[in-house]
Amino acid sequence: MDPPSSAPATNPSESRAFRRWLKKASLVTGLGLTAEERERYLEEQKHVRCEKWKAELLSYSPPVVFMLKHLRLSGCAVPPSNIVCGSCDSTRSGGFHPSGAIVLCQGHFGSKRHMQDTLTHELIHMYDHCKFNLDWYNLRHHACSEIRANSLSGDCRFMREVGRGNASFSKQHQACVRRRAILSVRENPKCPDEAAAERAVNEVWESCFNDTRPFDEIY
């Protein structure tokens, strides 16, 4: 009669590794987790990705590095700690505060290129605030910076508009810049209605659309 086989000894490190694997599988699939745990894990992953992309853009993105250089030359250097990845509502992908902070909405970027455009957009607002001492409650000031940021950041490049379902072969760039500027100014607490936002954009359109500082031309 064959002797009874003994169960193989469990390797503690393998056991821990297996438990970690199970934990990760649960997080990815959602099995065995509460909705709150699953949501917290997804937010953490979005934050990690946002911070990774931010670091790469601050070091290697041509438009981002260019804007940081010109902000520094203008006396408004932007440390990485002033650019924050955070959760936002579904209506925006980023934001600028006149105190010198930028928020990147960590759950709203489908690609690093999208984040690059958003960060460049907000850095242009920061440059305008630094260079021209804007009053953000003045609708004409706000409209001018929105025109410039949407035009120069890449927000209105053709493929971005295709993705939004707004592509046109006739003055597509100008139409996108105007539309997005009006939408942004409409959100200003001093703006009474859409007509006032459109009027502010129209009044400053020529001078602000043609002002590409600090770029030599539309990026």
Image: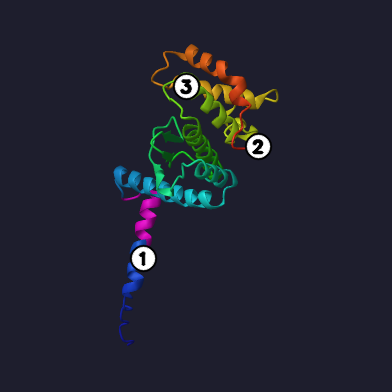
Quarter of the view holding residue 214: top right
Q: Name the residue under label 3.
A: 185
**Element under disc 1:** helix
Residue depicted at x 30% and y 47%:
37
Q: In this view, does 119 lie above or below 198?
A: below
Q: Is residue 73 visible?
A: yes
Does residue 28 belong to the magenta stretch? yes
120 within the magenta span:
no
Q: In this view, does 35 lie above or below 174?
A: below
For marks 3 and 2, give the CA distance.
26 Å
* Residue 96 placement (x, y as % from top left): 43, 35
**Local SS, label 2:** loop
Q: Mark 1 points at which residue?
A: 18
Residue 65 in the figure: left or right of residue 42: right
* Three-letter amino acid code at the position of disc 1: Phe
* Label whose residue precedes the other's in the sequence (3 or 2): 3
Q: Are marks 1 and 3 in contact (CB under 8 Å)?
A: no
Return the residue nearer the eye: 209 or 37: 209
Q: What residue type is labelled 2?
A: Asp
Mark 2 sits on what residue?
Answer: 216
Q: Residue at x 31, y 73 (%)?
A: 12
Q: Give the range drawn in magenta.
A: 21-32
Question: The N terminus lies in which quarter of the figure?
Answer: bottom left
User: The residue tagged with tag 3: helix, strand or loop?
Assistant: helix
Q: In this view, does 67 lie to the left or right of 83?
A: right
Q: What residue type is labelled 3?
A: Val
Q: How far apart are marks 1 and 3 (CA)?
A: 54 Å
Q: Quadrant of the C terminus?
A: top right
Q: Earlier in the sequence, mark 2 or mark 1?
A: 1
Magenta span dominant secondary structure:
helix
Q: Is residue 154 above or below residue 144?
A: below
Res. 166 in view = no
